[in-house]
Amino acid sequence: MLLRPWPTLLLVVSSPIMKRYLLYKAGPAVLDVIRQEGLKPERVAVYAGPAGGPKWFVSVGFDRALMQTRFLQQRNERVLLAGASAGAWRCLAMACRDPEDAYESLRIAYSRNVFTRDDTPATVSAALRRNVESFIREEDVPHILEHKHFDLVVNTVRAKGPAASGNRGIEGFTLLVAALANAVWSRTMDLFYERVVFFAGSGTPLFVQQSFGGRMVRLTRENLRYAALATGSLPYIVAGVRQVPGAEGVYRDGGLQDYQLNQDYCPGTEALTLFFHYQERISPGWFDKKLPWRRPPKGSLDRVLQVYPSSDFVGLLPDSRLPDRDDFVRFVDDPRERIRRWDTVCEQSKILGEQFMEDVDSMRIKELVEPMKIA
């Protein structure tokens, strides 16, 4: 069914003695469909990317497999690429003129960031701006906006009140208050951060028409890079993004409201959202990471196929763990070692792309997919 660029490696991955490095969970609306027909590319209407800092490096091999086989372009209708922070950057790279080259430029730029104890939100923001410019070149901007096959959603938030302050102390205190309020009720996040989605495409995304709580801003040549920078600008750590063309206010990391998956992106359809995640648990908002009882809204996972690495795969990684943002601090005196470890993660992630394509082509995914646990 698909063009596979690694036939020799796939024979190894499909060997019965190989460990299972990739796991599949499906929501109730698509579970039986996948068990009956496997995963057909024409079913995939959305590819969603979660936030999560350097954890995104485990997705490199999976994303490359999608790009090399043109898996997401096999649907007759347009496909929505949606994400926040690093998830949005992955989507933006996949929509560039040369997606594989842009994606690799993003990977190199992000992993080679070197920060010191003297860095400030302003210097970190400057580094992220260079990251964005490294993979979204001038010629890529119109290509992304007028893509023949992909629509695009970049999740951000507009800071409100004290959260919009440029004072680090005020921002830190506001974050603490927002975290405490969120632990009581997630809707209190709206008091501090308004969900704002920057989008490009032929029309308003379906999820906005039916289940969205926020504001939409169309991506343009003038604001695309601003939106890309904003979606990765965490409060307190990175400076807020101001003076965005077509959008007043101070904009920040979309993961504050849409951290991993917090929307039903294809409501009321027979299509599904393909969601590669770095873990099994799905947290709706950034502050929900430490709240094990917090789950995505009812119905938001019904049409989702979640793909994520197993513990056996994580065991192959340095220190048997996923990379994370704390690595910048952990290896502040030895950035070369951090970069080496992150490169190792990216190299190992090839296994996940290979196994996915083999599971889809062989129809093994029909037996492998399991029901998603939905509260």
Image (tube, rainbow, N blue to C red):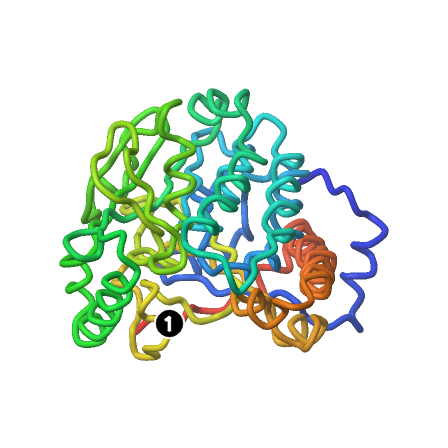
Position of residue 99 measured from the top left corner of the image (x, y, whole percent): 61, 34
- Name the residue rendered at 46%, 31% in the picture: 150
Q: Could you say whether the residue bearing mark 1 is in a helix, strand or loop?
A: helix
Circle 1 residue: 289
**Three-letter amino acid code at disc 1?**
Lys
- Side (left or right) of 306 relative to 106: left
- Side (left or right) of 55 relative to 82: right
Q: Nearer the viewer, residue 367 or 132?
A: 132
Q: Residue furthest right?
A: 8
- Name the residue rendered at 36%, 52% in the picture: 253
Q: Residue furthest front?
A: 118
Whether residue 368 is visible here, answered yes or no, is no
Residue 134 drawn above or below residue 338 = above
- Name the residue rendered at 80%, 65% in the picture: 15
Position of residue 294 measured from the top left corner of the image (x, y, whole percent): 29, 73
Whether residue 231 is visible here, answered yes or no, is yes
Q: Based on the displayed image, in which of its 4 quarters is residue 246 positioned?
A: top left
- Side (left or right) of 259 relative to 157: right
Q: Nearer the viewer, residue 6 or 85?
A: 85
Q: Quadrant of the N terminus?
A: top right
- Side (left or right) of 57 relative to 143: right
